[in-house]
């Protein structure tokens, strides 16, 4: 059986590039940018006034002139007015372009206006005050956002500001989530005494929808022939198959055999981890990738985050983020020689340290506890006892 | 001018309750749960086998019996078989219900099967092993998820597992985002020398869409009459107006006057903060709430997170989360007697402490830097110098 680290390495050896596509910038949040966003002008594009008030020449003020005749009013968007005399000013609004002969702006709070004359009420002014100078932030041609970034709300705004109505983004894989097992009934149905309702497909879909990945879902019964037929169609129509259930050693676990019959190369089956030990991973020559997770809801959820999402973002070229570590809040013992992914609630203590508090539960089957958890903390194999205060990697969700 | 704390208190005094609605659980992620999700059965609902193998009576094994005749095979979902003799076993699959006369499960890895006889290859077994007992996680009627929680992917799965195809969730306010200013042109248009493109409405929409809030957008020109007409329609058709721009002291800032003409009570105008000093906040007798933010993109973005989102979640009844503090990574000086919301990039250091590194910029106008920031750190008014290593509140986005 391979270790978590080996499993991770093998999964990340199977990255796929699905190409790029252009989409409207308004719908691009969450997607991965596939081009640089570049400043089309200097930022600001002109000497931009940052308050409402008057624009003057500082030299005129420092030579003793406290009164300025208002030569005109200039709104944001207007062509800048010209002041011809040193004792003139322009009444000017936030966002307007500074008149070429002015170099300083005094805000309304510091002047009094009477009969077309502005009187300055403060003694200290500094040349250039209340002006955001052209190109102070960025120069035309500067890269504002680099390719490879996940598009956030500010990046949507930046795209708007430079006129990028369409953005090139990385294409996402077509994903199908497949559940199996005759013991599973529909949500609307009342399960028999020994049945349960299907839920993993909904959890997986909700996680992927949050990442902007559209998901199809399918359920296959415990039937060898149907299993193989359905999987064959999926291999031909999707880039990624995420299976939940049917990968243990059970007599009715037809999936590993069907996958092999369909020429899907098994890259590993079983990982030294709990939950998720029976995880099966493989790929088809046509490029399709198969993540077959055990049906235990916590196992599916953990493997989805630990393996699938990492694979997805690595393949999309997102700059790899450093792993996050948290302080284990209380001692924890786990005897089997497996990596244990313990459900924890994250918080920050009074020193701003990230603390992971184990959420009580009965091991990997207790799905209800996931509602009270934020993350899994990864307790490595080869040790039995993990002490409060030690740092371990966390996968937040 | 009021402080940030006073502004926060006044904003939070204007909470509104928009009621509840039923929605399909599959579309409920991100919404606020308005009912408890309760276990409809014990969890697990039966003594659930957690491995593939054989079910036996431990007493028979401890009395020296190492060979068990396979009396039948039981899949997940099947009615439990009955073992009548002590030397019989049931070949049983993960997820199946334990036969009533069995109390222990041995996995395939620890047995050898030949001619319908299973031989146990291990010496130590413990009674009850590999069984997840009925009700061990939760009892029928237990609350699995409390009302007031934001619905996550695991909660979607939990709803599915207990058959809640519809969930009661808090209704969201109808929000309109209104920009103003004749200097603003459409994204597709080429701005004149002294114009810029509209972007705040897109940023605000992207933030709110991420919260599941549908948003309408409107742009009003710098015209007193039109401003009042449009705002009047909005007050009658929306629960919340988020305005960006037009709230300074400028001659063409018709918005504060129009809002007062429309009988919208001004609760404050101007806050001792940068960015966002000219923030105007008020409410109408019909319940509508008006957040009028300054047009500076960073100011709008900060105020949206600091004031609007806090107001939204408090009104939706989300259990108040503790503020998060981060360690300032480098000394920072800010002289004006205002709370300063500094753009920072968050990371965790080797002690798992949350560290906030200031993102270089030219003050509140530099919107492009938001792409490289994760959060604002709130440096309080009344101080000029903030030292590396000190802890301050952060608003992450």
Image (spheres, coloured by chain):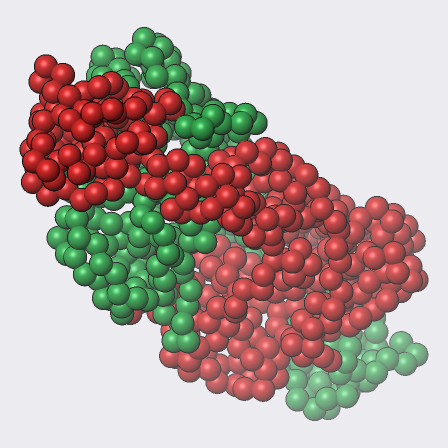
Chain colours: A green, B red
Residue A287 placement: quadrant: top left
Q: Is residue B298 left or right of residue A66?
A: left
Report the residue at 30% width, 60% height from top: A325
- Quarter of the figure that contains the N terminus of chain A: top left
Q: Is residue A145 left or right of residue B205?
A: left
Report the residue at 28% width, 56% height from top: A393
Residue B18 in sight = yes
Q: How many marks?
A: 0
Is the residue B237 above or below the residue A360 in the image?
A: above
Camera-side residue of B200 and B192: B200
Is the residue A33 above or below the residue B379 in the image?
A: above
Report the residue at 52% width, 68% height from top: B322
Camera-side residue of B183 and B162: B162
Residue A176 in sight = no
Report the residue at 80% width, 48% height from top: B238
Q: Is residue B166 left or right of residue B78?
A: right
Q: Position of residue A6 (x, y in %)?
A: 16, 40
Q: Is residue B389 left or right of residue B131?
A: right
Q: Position of residue A36 (x, y in %)?
A: 44, 44
Q: Position of residue B349 (x, y in %)?
A: 31, 67
Camera-side residue of B353 and A41: B353
Q: Position of residue A123 (x, y in %)?
A: 70, 91
């Amino acid at each position: 059986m391979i270790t978590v680290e080996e499993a991770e390495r093998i999964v990340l050896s199977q990255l796929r590039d699905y190409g790029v596509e252009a989409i409207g910038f308004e719908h691009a949040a969450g997607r991965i940018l596939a081009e640089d966003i570049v400043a089309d002008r200097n930022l600001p594009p002109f000497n931009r006034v940052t308050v409402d008030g008057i624009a003057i020449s500082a030299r005129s003020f420092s030579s003793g002139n406290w009164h300025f005749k208002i030569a005109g009013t200039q709104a944001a968007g207007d062509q800048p007015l010209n002041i011809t005399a040193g004792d003139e000013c322009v009444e000017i609004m936030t966002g307007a372009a500074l008149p070429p002969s002015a170099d300083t702006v005094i805000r309304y709070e510091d002047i009094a206006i009477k009969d077309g004359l502005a009187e300055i009420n403060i003694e200290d002014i500094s040349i250039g005050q209340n002006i955001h100078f052209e190109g102070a932030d960025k120069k035309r041609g500067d890269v504002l956002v680099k390719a490879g970034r996940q598009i956030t709300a500010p990046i949507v705004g930046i795209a708007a500001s430079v006129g990028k109505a369409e953005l090139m983004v990385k294409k996402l894989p077509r994903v199908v989530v497949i559940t199996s097992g005759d013991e599973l009934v529909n949500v609307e149905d009342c399960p028999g005494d020994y049945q349960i309702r299907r839920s993993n497909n909904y959890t997986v879909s909700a996680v992927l929808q949050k990442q902007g990945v559209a998901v199809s879902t399918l359920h296959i019964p415990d039937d060898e022939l149907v299993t193989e037929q359905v999987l064959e169609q999926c291999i031909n129509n999707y880039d990624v198959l995420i299976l939940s259930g049917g990968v243990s050693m059970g007599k009715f676990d037809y999936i590993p055999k069907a996958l092999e019959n369909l020429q899907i190369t098994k890259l590993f089956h079983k990982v030294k981890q709990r939950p998720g030990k029976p995880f099966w991973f493989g790929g088809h020559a046509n490029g399709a990738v198969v993540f077959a997770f055990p049906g235990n809801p916590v196992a599916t959820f953990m493997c989805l985050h630990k393996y699938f999402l990492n694979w997805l973002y690595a393949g999309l070229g997102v700059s790899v983020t450093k792993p996050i570590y948290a302080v284990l809040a209380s001692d924890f013992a786990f005897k089997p020689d497996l990596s244990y992914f313990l459900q924890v609630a994250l918080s920050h203590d009074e020193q701003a340290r990230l603390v992971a508090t184990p959420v009580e539960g009965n091991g990997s089957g207790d799905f209800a506890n996931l509602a009270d958890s934020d993350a899994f903390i990864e307790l490595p194999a080869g040790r039995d006892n993990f002490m409060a205060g030690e740092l371990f990697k966390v996968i937040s969700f």
